[in-house]
Amino acid sequence: MSATESLVRLIGSVSLLLWGLYMVRSGVTRAFGSELHRIVGRAVSNRLSAFLSGIGVTLIVQSSTATALIISSFASRGVIALPAALAVMLGADIGTTLVAQVLSFDLSLMPYILVLVGLVLHGPKRSSKTRQLGRAVFGLGLMLLALSLIVQTSEPLRNSVILQDVFASISAEPMIAILLAALLTWVSHSSLAIVLLVMSFAVGGVITIDLAFLLVIGANIGGVIPPIVATLNEGDLARRVTFGNAGFKITGAIIFFPLLGMMPDLLGRISEEPARLVVNFHTFFNFCLAFVFVPLVGFSAGVWERVIQPSASQTDDDQPRFLDEKTVNTPVLALACATREVGRMAETVDTMLRGVSECLRTDDYAAVDELIELDDRVDTLYDEIKSYVTRVSRQEIDSPESDRVVEILMFTTNLEHMGDIIESLLGALVRRSKKEITFSKEGQADLLELNTRLISNLTLAINIFNSGDVALARQLIKEKTRVNKLQAQYVQNHLERLRDGRIESVATSSLHMDVLRDQRRIHSHITAVAYPILEQAGKLRKTRLKS
């Protein structure tokens, strides 16, 4: 076999390894993405539980990068404190090394068994979760098969004089070796894949153990680059997590660099096999980092909070923050991103609705222009969320995810209509102020009371949208009846004031009735969030008409 043919086979084998790793990662996240988010979200009460959750999640998804993106997203929302987030990242690095340990063993028949099992599980009549699990198992089989191919293909390469000269020159320049491995890891987005590749080269005799250790350090450093790049625009809270983890790696590399000479003898007491030496060094490096830095995550957090200050230039609030295009092919994660963006949209509508109360209460219209402009943000977010969720719906999704798509589209549509109504309502109130007419005290109190009910029920609707709680949905439908009765009562109150000839009521009659009408329309859009949830739970009648 010529060197060129061996090189082509090697590149193909490495590509197969990366594809298998991608299949494992995407299969697991699609099948268990929401569960993984809940596990991490609950297990961050202290640094030890956070550290262990990082190990567990990374063992499942086989990617510390995926774990980093989950944690940085939690940190950006304030769900997890920075010390706990850093502890999770240290655990994620341990999880990657444990995966490498398992894959380094000689599992000659296992690739073929896993590929067969994955193919069976991915059958057309299986549920979506089972199919995604089959995808992950199939990908794991491909990874093991690729590793065996890399070892077989790399053995002839050790006789290549050119490669020997190249690797000898790299060994003589440790910094170049580390930077090369870091670059390859950045390109492949997987430190695990590069460590396994280095292990295969060491087993095939293509590189020395000393060079393998340098490349492993480079792979560890390169593994922090993709999360950093992904969070550059995520705000200071997310960047502190990824930069903090990079600080751990770089500090560890600086400490380990002068000690590399004694590592082969030290780790050789456990096993002198090249595969075991490489993965044991990878594990030893990350366990040392965890042992040193887990107790110091509080101190590290303080350092990075001083280093990475909040950006002076604010991001454009009218643009989406959480619609991550990288997760579109993973519906579970993508719908979670869309839900977060819907939360921003709902908060904007809530701000507008509270502005109505302020205008009614104080007749202060200083901020009304800003409130009206918020409708542009609502419209923009609506268009972006609708487009994003539509792209997600084109993926392979199961019934619960399909239902969630419908809920998101319906809720955002209702929020967009509410924004338009509130914008019109605010404009009418401004025109009333220019005419220097005021509501009667009783009429003003009625409008304020009804608007307070709307604000309270919008908060309830947001909770229902996030939780899918059937009991809360029933409560919101009951609130619709109460608000309708209240609105009818306030109309009657206004008519009585007109019959009494109240000057304020006569002057504001048209506007007063318009406000009451708009408030009822807004509340109808608020309560609409409950109907899909009640329908899925079988709590709605087919018709309200008499037979």
Image (cartoon, rainbow, N blue to C red):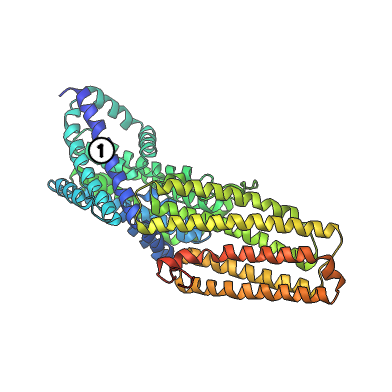
Say which residue appears at 27% left-offset and 50% top-offset: 136
* Total numbered circles: 1
Vertical placement of 96 versus 480: above or below?
above
Out of 354 and 492, give the one closest to the viewer. Answer: 492
Quarter assignment of residue 199: top left
Is residue 348 something that shows in the picture?
no
Q: Position of residue 2 (x, y in %)?
A: 17, 22
Which residue is rendered at x = 71% and y = 62% of the image?
355
Instruction: Locate residue 114 relative to residue 293 in the image: left or right.
Output: left
Foreground of the two, 442 or 364: 442
Is residue 268 toward the left or the right of residue 466 in the image? left
The 10 Å Cα crowd at callout 1, few under 14, some 14 to 19, many 20 or more, is many
In which image quadrant can residue 40 be found? bottom left
Amino acid found under the numbered disc labelled 1 = Leu
Query: On the rendered structure, is 6 left or right of 338?
Result: left
Give the quarter of the figure containing the C terminus. Answer: bottom left
Q: x, y percentage for residue 55? A: 34, 58
Quarter containing the N terminus:
top left
Question: Is there any visible trace of residue 400 in the rendered image?
Answer: yes
Q: Position of residue 197 (x, y in %)?
A: 26, 39
* Residue picked out by circle 1: 16
Q: Is residue 362 above or below residue 156?
A: below
